[in-house]
Image (cartoon, grey):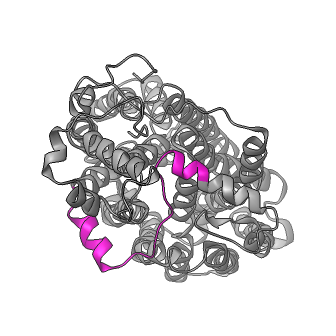
Amino acid sequence: MFWKEGETNINDDPEQLASRGIDLQAVAQHTKTKEEKWFLFKLDLYLLTFGCLSQIIKYIDQQNIQTAYVSGMSEALNLTGNELNYFITYFNVGYALFLIPSQVMITRVRPSLWLPGLEFCWGVLTGAIAACKHPKQIYAIRAFIGICESSAYPGTVTLLMTWYTPLEMAKRIGFYHSCQAIGAMMSGALQTAIHESLEGKSGIPGWQWTFILNCEHADVLHGISFCSPFMIPDFPDNPNPRAFWLKPRDKEIARERLDRFTRSSPNPINLKCALRTLKNPLLYMFIYMYVGMLIAPSGNSFFQLWLKSLVNKDGNKVWGISALNAIPMGGYAMQVAAVWIFAFGSDYFRTRWLMILAQVVIGFPPTVIMTIWNVPDGAKYFSYFALYFCTASGPPLWSWLSDMLPIDAEQRALIIGICISMYYAVNAWSNVLIWPTKQASHYKFGWPVSMALWITVAIVICSLRIYDLKVVRPRNYRIAQEMMNNHEGMIEEQPKTVEEIDQKLGDEQEDKQINTAKVLPVI
């Protein structure tokens, strides 16, 4: 449901509007000029190109550890226990520990320098796994890879939030987010090609060729990292002087676009911002939603192990190595489609929560089937593939966060960092406990835990929707009015935070009627 001019009484109270579900969701009466369209094209070309190439290469590497494991690595290194879980765990620990410091740094050091620097270090580390002879060596390298990779996704999402308007944001985050699945698809195709053409060449097994070719990917990433200081635009309030494509008029347009939707670039994150964030109920709701939405369908990560366990009546394996790497590619294709559908739907229908809740509804039945377990293999194939369609919550989730905190960009950056860090921290220990490789392919606890998570996440989504309508939107209407008054010269100094604005307005503004035809439309 979204607002159109003339649908509401101009003297309606904002809280009454919000409680009736009327969504003044950034539907500004504005038509993009040719200048703005050209600026948007350049922004997509440079910022999204950097983000998407980086994400694709990183997810090729992330998936390679699993494809290599089922393609001969486990036998070559005599991995008979939970080593695969620990490969993931050490990566998660490094990622979780460095993510929040990285989000702080991105507000203090230019992203055009910080992000490429870590990209370069990441590229150096990835190919080193090919030389490893012992699992402990891989553990150490995976931890450092996690450290270097921790800045990429949250840092890029933070940049996208500051450059794109609410009507453009979910589509761009969705396009960027879908590159994770594209990278995973390419990893499967790469491993299949390696097994068929490079297995045993020069005396090197196929799984090692996987990581040797990672060095080639790293060279591509090194090229990106050298170009990135000229591609990444930094923030609209402090643009990158090296970004040759960002002309003076482009900078003005960027600032005008943020003002139109009462958005702002982040200031350096400090202790005051951290305390403000920790007191905000949104932090804890988003943590649970984000972590739950990722862990609930995470059983599909072990699809290959289930495929590998299947045997014919004569005792032979149902699927060969090439098939083990090729079959999950269909799931990743479904994930790409899901990300685009839910991201575009989020912007088109101007709703975030329904796009997230829809994935819960889709994901619940497969986990029920897998919890029962004693079902035909066809039902298990369906369940594994269906779960790929439920891994697209990121774009509408982050867009919803941006809608709720339009002017507090520091809180947005910190909440993104904390949410993702909490996921990797939880996954570091939960992965071993609920999805132990020794139990593959029948996990006693994983599927029941997933089923419970879907239920509780649905409750949190609905609770956040109510909180949005009853608390967040009325507050944002008041903020919008305050900023409108400031633009009209009625207030000399514009407050910088939600708390300052609330204090300046005073409690009496709670019941003040506003003209919804004039107020800046903010969710």
Q: Would you identify the image quadrant in which residue 198 lies?
A: bottom right
Of residues 299 and 206, which is closer to you in this image? Answer: 299
On screen, 66 above or below 362?
Answer: below
On screen, 424 above or below 113?
Answer: above
The structure residue drawn at horizontal position 41% and vertical position 45%, both measured from the top left corner, is 403
Can residue 195 be seen from the camera position used here?
A: yes
Of residues 299 and 197, which is closer to you in this image? Answer: 299
Task: Locate residue 129 relative to residue 423 in the image: left or right.
Answer: right
The structure residue drawn at horizontal position 27% and vertical position 63%, both measured from the top left corner, is 500
Q: Would you identify the image quadrant in which residue 272 lies?
A: bottom left
| Residue 372 percent coordinates (x, y) | 27, 30
| Residue 418 percent coordinates (x, y) | 35, 65
Can residue 458 be seen from the camera position used here?
A: no
| Residue 378 percent coordinates (x, y) | 47, 23
Residue 63 belongs to magenta span: no
| Residue 148 percent coordinates (x, y) | 56, 76
Task: Locate residue 138 relative to residue 45 in the image: left or right.
Answer: left
Task: Locate residue 320 relative to residue 39 in the image: left or right.
Answer: left
Number of marks in the rendered image: 0
In this picture, which residue range is highlighted in magenta? 256-280
The structure residue drawn at horizontal position 73% and vertical position 56%, both measured from the top left corner, is 250
Q: Quadrant of the C terminus?
A: top left
Of residues 127 and 319, which is closer to you in this image? Answer: 127
Residue 266 belongs to magenta span: yes
From this viewpoint, which residue is outermost toward the top?
7
Of residues 260 and 239, which is closer to you in this image? Answer: 260
Q: Would you identify the image quadrant in which residue 293 lies?
A: top left
Q: Quadrant of the N terminus?
A: top left
On screen, 468 above or below 357?
Answer: below
The structure residue drawn at horizontal position 27% and vertical position 51%, both measured from the top left corner, is 288
